[in-house]
């Protein structure tokens, strides 16, 4: 009789791996921690972590976590946008320099939240020679 792995629950180590990933660890570090494999060769750990990440149940759980995280961020952005617009409404008729300055700061923040700020240039100078790369973010 063959067991169907898809119906089996995640093991404690697999759950620990998932938790580590959702806490921001790299796949290999999450694997080393979850499986207490700190003495394992790094290349072997990369392979094992990659295999574990491709496990359908773990992939689905990570995808669900990321989707929920995106939804939380969008909800937070909506709430923040509403609060900032309300603040702008209260400052709308302001004539003092302090309130006008606050209104401009609020508008800049709204623009940044929604991606309307001007691109930032970041210089990436290689450590060991080579061409400097300018990344527009």
Image (cartoon, helix red, strand yellow):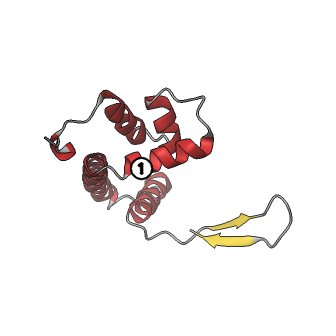
Place residue 38 in its image quadrant. Answer: top right
| Residue 7 vs residue 24, the one in the foreground | 7
The residue lying toward the viewer, choosing from 21 and 105, is 21
Name of the residue lying farthest toward the right: 129
Q: Residue at x 30, y 57 (%)?
A: 81
Percent across and percent down for residue 27 are 48, 45
Number of numbered discs overlaid on the protein picture? 1
Q: Which element carries disc 1, helix, strand or loop?
A: helix
Q: Is residue 26 visible?
A: no
Image quadrant holding the N terminus, namely: top left
Please provide percent x and percent y for residue 119.
56, 71
Which quadrant: the C terminus?
Answer: bottom right
Quick check: 93 above or below 10?
below
**Camera sees residue 77:** yes
Question: Could you say which is closer to the camera, residue 131 or residue 71?
Answer: 131
Residue located 80% across and 73% down the image: 131
| Extreme residue toward the front, this view | 1
**Label 1 neighbourhood size at 10 Å, few (<14), some (14-19), many (20+)?**
few
Residue 19 lies, with reference to residue 78, above or below; the image says above
| Residue 33 pos. (x, y %) | 49, 30
Q: x, y (%) of residue 48?
A: 47, 44
Residue at image mark 1:
51
Near-viewer residue (70 or 78): 70
In screen coordinates, is 121 left or right of 75? right
Residue at position x 27%, y 52% from top?
Answer: 56
């Amino acid at each position: 009789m063959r067991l169907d792995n898809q119906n089996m629950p995640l093991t404690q180590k697999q759950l620990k791996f998932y938790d580590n990933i959702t806490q921001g660890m790299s796949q290999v570090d999450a694997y080393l921690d979850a499986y207490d494999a700190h003495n394992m060769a790094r290349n072997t750990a990369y392979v094992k972590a990659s295999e574990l990440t491709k496990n359908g149940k773990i992939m689905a759980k990570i995808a669900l976590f990321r989707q929920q995280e995106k939804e939380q961020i969008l909800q937070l952005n909506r709430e923040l946008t509403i609060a900032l617009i309300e603040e702008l409404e209260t400052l709308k008729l302001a004539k003092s320099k302090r309130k006008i300055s606050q209104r401009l700061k609020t508008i800049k923040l709204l623009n940044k939240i929604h991606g309307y700020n001007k691109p930032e240039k970041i210089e990436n100078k290689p450590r060991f020679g080579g061409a400097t790369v300018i990344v527009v973010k």
